[in-house]
Amino acid sequence: MTKSDSVSVCSLNIRNRWSQILGCIFISIIFAVGYTWLIGPSALWQALTSVSSWQFGFLLLISIVPMILWGSGFYVILRRLGHEGSFVVSILLMNASGFLNTITPFGQLGGNPPAALLIKRALGTDFETALAAIGLINATNRLASLFLGFLAASYLGWQLVVERAFNTAIFTLTGVIVAAVFAVGFLWQYRYMLVDYSSWVLSIISKPLDYLPRITAPSQQRFQQHGVQFIEALELLATAPAQLALVFGLCMAGQIFIAGILWTALTALGAESLFVTVLLVIPIAKLGAVAPTPGGLGAAETILTGALVTMTGMSSAVAGAAALLYRASAFWIPALSGGFITAWYLTHKSASQKT
């Protein structure tokens, strides 16, 4: 095993960090108990048990489609970056990144770096390229969800008499989109200046590592080199508008199927809801992913339940059951397969060792 691979395994270290795993389980139990208590245990259980096994199986079947679509987009990005990887491997790694997003705080922000390390180990690419690839596909997914939500909000505002709750949701979503566009444009305009400043800050923060035995803190030049390589990978992707449009279309299709999972869960519970309303609710609920809990656990379910109750008038028990069915079939259960994929890559030789 090379030194680089050793660092990658130590950085992920999923198998050995039992204390962190137990901590995540403890936090999960606290949120589960609090969430159930707020909704009402008996009402929530009654709503969940009204769903038949074949309906739940259908939900799980639908959840496979978004992962294939997103894996296809990830494959297109990797090809653009010069990696001749397998289409199936791209789907598997996308699923593994979903697992890492689920077990790390702050959702994709926390899951992207370990996912990039896993991609580096699996494909033999450099960390910066892997981070650019996984970061772009995840960001495009977020953008596709926001765009669909904006279209849904525009339709509801045009076709229906919009109540105050919908007005709030529309203004919130529009504000998030506008802020995101301006933030991305500003950061991209001053990307190299941002790399210089960030490398200076990181070199100062990591300086105390020099006082630890057998550890040398990375220099400012080293941080700057990694930052420039990351920017160059993004610039290469930015010069392929046709491929980016294809990736965006695949992400849009995946998000439509994700909305279909929630709509199917509501239908299975006997709750009537417009599909366009579901498209509006989902991007709002995803704001819970920024919570400092593994995969936004607790926050995402609470926001989704509140949004469904506010916008559709359904009972909290039905909304809570729909949120749990949606999260389980779209994220939690697929994350289990992603965990097995992650474990497989960690216990087998890396691509750099095979060449």
Image (cartoon, rainbow, N blue to C red):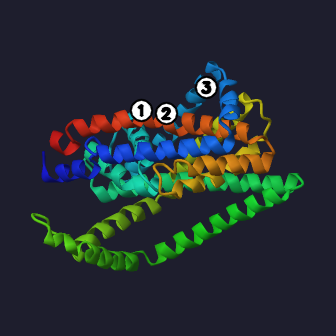
| Residue wearing tag 3 | 56
Q: Earlier in the sequence, mark 2 or mark 3?
A: 3
Please report contact status of discs 1 and 3: CB closer than 8 Å, yes or no: no
- On the question of residue 281 being in view, the answer is yes
Above or below: residue 252 compared with residue 328: below
Give left or right: position of 82 versus 67: left
Q: Residues within 10 Å of mark 2 (few under 14, many from 20)?
A: some
Q: Name the residue tied to disc 1.
A: 337
Looking at the picture, which amino acid does disc 2 mark? Answer: Ile
Badge 1 amino acid:
Ser
Say which of 86 and 141 sits in front: 141
* Residue most extreme to the right: 161
SS state under label 1: helix
Q: CA distance from mark 1 to mark 3?
A: 17 Å
Q: CA distance from mark 2 to mark 3?
A: 12 Å
Q: Where in the figure is residue 104, as x and y percent of width and height?
A: 41, 51
Q: Can residue 239 be seen by looking at this rendering?
A: no
The span from disc 2 to disc 1 (Cα, nearest Å) is 7 Å
Q: Are marks 2 and 1 in contact (CB under 8 Å)?
A: yes
Asked which secondary structure carries label 3, the reply is helix
Front in this rendered view, residue 23 or 340: 23
Q: Which residue is mark 2?
A: 333
Q: Is residue 51 left or right of residue 79?
A: right
Q: Secondary structure at mark 2?
A: helix
| Residue 138 x, y percent position in the rendering | 48, 52
Sequence-wise first label, 1 or 3:
3
Instruction: Classify the position of the N terminus by image quarter.
Output: top left
- How many marks do you count on the picture? 3
What residue is drawn where x is 31% and y is 65%? 229
Q: Residue at x 26, y 75 (%)?
A: 203
Which amino acid is tagged 3? Phe
Image-quadrant location for residue 198: bottom left
